[in-house]
Image (cartoon, helix red, strand yellow):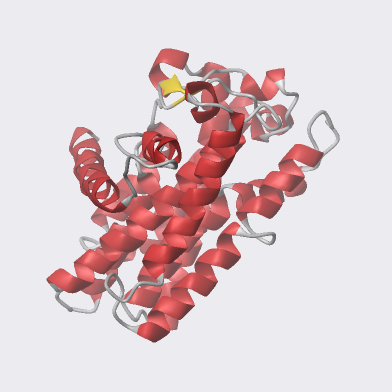
Amino acid sequence: MIDFVDKLKKNSYEIDRFLDEYLPTGNGLNAKLFEAMRYSSIRSGKKIRAFLVVESGKFLSAINNKYITKSKYRELITIASVIEAIHSYSLIHDDLPAMDNSPIRRGKPSNHVKYDYHTAILAGDALVSWAFEIIGDSNFIEDPKKRAEICFVLAKAIGPNGMVGGQQADMDFKEKNNLSLKEIEWIQNHKTGALISCCSLLASILLDANEIQKNALINYANNIGLAFQIADDLLDVDGKEEVIGKPVMQDKTNETPNFVTILGKENASKKAIQISNDAVNLIQKFQPESENLVSLAKYTVNRTY
């Protein structure tokens, strides 16, 4: 697991280098906005989603006996970095008083605490705009058809039928304790899972995966997304704030129904492990090419932050 964490850190460094180079900077009237965008994106978080993009691409290249060229690898890093910018936007908005009202994120003051409410809202908006600006730029992704498809798929994943729709449902059903397990799964598959499964789908588009390969990766990523959310719910109960980098017992404070409130800690933990194992079973037959993806599935439920 230590070796895998080192791989995560190496990937995170590459993504930070891209974000540091291409996120806007300046001393003009919008300098505060630029600073807020960078504050929540660079040298912040585990960047698991970026890792999933890159490793999905490497996996597809390996099983198809294709060498990843320098330019193709740069395109993978571009997509991975864009995904992380969008994830950062979602966390900035999620921490706002109108939503989870969390003062700490990733071990430091949340964006709206560091700056102010309007800057946090606009920094999140700007990160989304920047992400699509990068994806639509031929200097970063060469093939125009792939640029268009990636933009479409990503917009769908984070929109009203994806991440944002899941967040809306999550907010609407706070304080309602009669949700079924199926309804909780729907919320989390959209709120958290949509962007995670999108990571593997975008890599599949870029690497020209066939339908069998694409479906295997998407199903794997769907399982990863759900297992990740259950693990998050468990950390909210049993984690330590100084380790996970955000307040604990947030769901209880906000009266948010989740897998732990529905299943209890023990059964929620068993379900997370089962889903992680399901993810592993989908790609384990491709060993050793799938080694890092197998490790990611196991890390998802064994992590302490």
Q: Is residue 243 left or right of residue 58?
A: right
The image quadrant that residue 217 belongs to is bottom left
Q: Image height check: is 210 above or below 219?
A: below
Which residue is situated farthest in the front direction here? 29
The residue nearer to you, when weighing 141 against 174, is 141
Residue 173, how many percent across, how many down?
A: 80, 38
Number of marks present in the image shown:
0
Q: Residue at x 42, y 55 (%)?
A: 83
Q: Residue at x 59, y 26 (%)?
A: 266
Residue 71, how many percent across, how many down?
A: 18, 72
The residue nearer to you, when weighing 98 against 8, is 98
Residue 85, how many percent across, how many down?
A: 42, 49
Q: Residue at x 69, y 59 (%)?
A: 160
Residue 137, how many percent across, how many down?
A: 35, 72
Q: Is residue 7 left or right of residue 110?
A: left
The image quadrant that residue 35 belongs to is top left
Q: Image height check: is 265 above or below 222?
A: above
Q: Residue at x 39, y 39 (%)?
A: 31
- Image quarter where the C terminus lies is top left
The residue nearer to you, when weighing 202 against 99, is 99
Q: Image height check: is 236 above or below 178?
A: above
Q: Is residue 220 visible?
A: no
- Image quarter where the N terminus lies is top left
